[in-house]
Amino acid sequence: MSILIIDNNDSFTYNLRHLLQTAQSSEPDVISYDSIDKVDFQRYDTIVISPGPGKPSEYPNYSKLFKSGKPIIGVCLGMQIMAEFYGGEVSLLEDCFHGRTESIEFDGKSFEVARYHSLAITRVPSCFTVISSNQATVPMAMTHNEFPYIGYQFHPESFLTKNGQFFIDYAFKFINSIRA
Amino acid sequence: MPSNSSIQFAPEQFDRLFQELYRIYKADMFLSRSEFPGGGDCYIGLEPCHQLIVTDKTTKEQIESFCFNDTDPTFGYLSYNYGYRLRGVLSNKITEFPYGHLKKYSAVIKYDGKSLELSVFDETFDIDLDKIISLTEAKTPFEIGHIKPAESINSSLDRDEYILRTESAIDYIREGYIYQLNLTIKYECDFQASDLFPLYASFWKTFPASHYVLFESEPYQIISTSPESFLSVIDGKVLSQPIKGTLAYDTYDESLAVKLKESPKESAELSMIVDMVRNDISINCEHGSVKVSDHKTTFTVDNLIQMYSKVQGKLRRDKTVIDLMLDSFPGASITGCPKKKAMELIDELEPHFRDVYCGSFFVINDKRNMESSIAIRTGYLDKDKGRLAFFAGSGIVVESKAESEYLETTAKAGKFLDILKSEQKP
C-alpha cells in the first residue's frame, strides 16, 4: 500500500503520517499543496488531504486529484475540500472548537475525539452520506455514495483522540469495500 | 574535547567561579538549575576559537559542518528570524541582529548541579583545576553590582494597541486561519552599564530557572533567563517540554495550580502545542516512538505557575540533532498553530522583529546529544547604542480576553520591568 499525504501547510501532518504508517506499515510520502501540480497520483494507492489553515476556496488545485479516480481520505480542511468540490457548502461555526475533545457516536460506539476547527460543512453534497455528526448536528464523518472517499472533521491523529487508529483502520476498510 | 580532570564543587563555590570567569574572560554562560523541569548541567565557554555568524543565507550544511567537523561541543543560538527562512515565511522587516551565532571554545567547563562534579575540558587554553580553585579562593562575596533604573521604557505595543492586535488575532482564529497565535511586545530602554552581567547574576539569584544564558554576540550581549526547554537529546532520546498555561500569583497556593489545570482555555492552549510538538519531532523520530506523558504538569518560576507536558521520541539513526532542531524551529509554543500561517500573521501583527527572542539557545555535544531552550524571558544589550531590549508575550486562543493576555504579558516581563524601574540597593 503506498500512500501520499498532501500537506496544506499544516502542523499536524506528521502525526497523521505516523498514524497511517502504523495502519499500513509503509511510510507515506508527503508533498506540499504548493507542488500538487507536479504529482503523479497514479503512483499511489490512497491519497490523504491534510488539515490546514483557511477555507476550501483557498485551495483551488484539487480537481486533478478528484479526477484521478484514486481513493481519498480527507481530514478536517481535507473533508471540507471534498464537500465543496462536490457542491457542498462550508461556513463559520458559531463557536469554534479548538484543542478540546468531544464524545461522538461512530459505527454504533462512543468515541472521545479531538476537534480543531472554526469552519464546518453546512450543506452536505447529495453524493455524500454523513456517517457521524455531533449533538449540534455538525458533520463529523462522511463517505461518498459511489467513490472510495471518506472524510473526518475531527482529528484521529491528535493525542487527545482516544484510539485514533480505529478511524484510520475504518477508512481503509471502507475504501476496500468500495473497490471490491 | 577530552575531559582533563574533575572535582567536587559546592554550588556557592560555583557561583563565585562563574563570576570570576566572567570578570576575567568574559565567558559565555549556559547555567541551569537542575531542580526545574528541563534543568541539567551548566556549561561555561572560555575563549572562542571558531565561530559561525548565521545570516538569512546560511544553509543547514554550513551549520552541520561547523558543529560536526570536530568533536568539540558547539554553543550558540538561532534567532527567531532564522525560522522565516526555514518555514518559507516572507517579511518586509529588516534587522541588523544576527540570525544566529555558533561558537567553539579553547576550553569548556561543565558543572553538574546534582552530583556537584565540575569538569574542565581544555586543549589549548591552559586552564586547570588548580587555577579554577584559586579563582574561587579570593573569598570575594558574590557581587550583584549596581543596576541603574531606566528613565523611560518604550514598548512596541502600548496597552490599547496590544488589545487591538489581540482582537485581530482572535478574528483570524474565528475565520479558521489559526488555532493559536503567540503575540509579543518588545520593550526598549537606555541602559547605563556596559554589560548585562549584574542583571544576569541578580536574576539568577532571585528568579532561578532551567536555562540561563549570557552570550556575547558583538555588538550585542544577550541575556536569556528561560524556564522552557525546547529539545533535549541524550544519546538519541528526544525530550521536549513545551510550556503553555500561566497564572501569576503573589502567594503560592496548591489550589491555584488546580485552577490552572482545570481551566478549559489553558488546557486547550497546551494541548494544541503538544500536538504540534509531536508533529515537529515526528519528522525525524522513529515511527511509533513519539509519546506524550505528564500532560498538564505544573511548576513555579518568576512568581508564575506554568503548565507543561513531556513529548518524547527516538531520533532516527539517519538523522542528527541539527535535522531535528531545524525541522522543529521555531518552537511551537512561541509561534502558534499551524506554524507557517501563525508566523505570517505574527509578522503582520507585531511591529517589531523578535531577533533572538523566541529563538533557541543550545549546547550541541555531537550528532545525537544536544540541550536547547526556547529563548523567552530574553533580552539583549546593543553595546554601541547603550540600549537594552527585552520581550514578553502570551498565547492567544479563541477564548482569550485581550485585557487578561495583556496582564499575563506584562507579568512575564515583570522581572525586567521591576528591576529597571526601581532604584537598586548597592
Image (spheres, coloured by chain):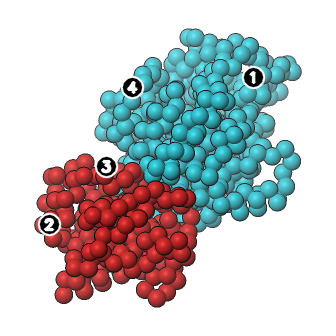
Chain colours: A red, B cyan
Q: Which label sits in the foreground, 1 or 2?
A: 2
Which mark, by number, is residue A58? Answer: 3
**Figure check: B76 above or below A145:** above
Residue B325 screen position, x and y as percent: 43, 47
Left or right of residue A86: residue B12: right
Instruction: Output the chain of dot 3.
Output: A
- The residue where tag 1 is placed is B420
Q: Residue at 22% across / 83% down in the picture?
A: A178
**Figure check: A49 above or below B355:** below
**Figure check: B360 above or below B310:** above
- The residue where tag 2 is placed is A68
CA distance for labels 3 and 1: 47 Å
Instruction: Determine contact: label 1, label 2, CB under 8 Å.
Output: no
Of the numbered discs 1 and 4, the one sitting upstream in the chain is 4
Badge 3 marks a residue whose secondary structure is helix
Amino acid at dot 3 = Glu
Amino acid at dot 2 = Ser
- The residue where tag 4 is placed is B92
Amino acid at dot 1 = Leu
Residue A110 screen position, x and y as percent: 52, 83
CA distance for labels 2 and 4: 40 Å
Q: Which label sits in the foreground, 3 or 1?
A: 3
> A20 and B65: which one is in front?
A20
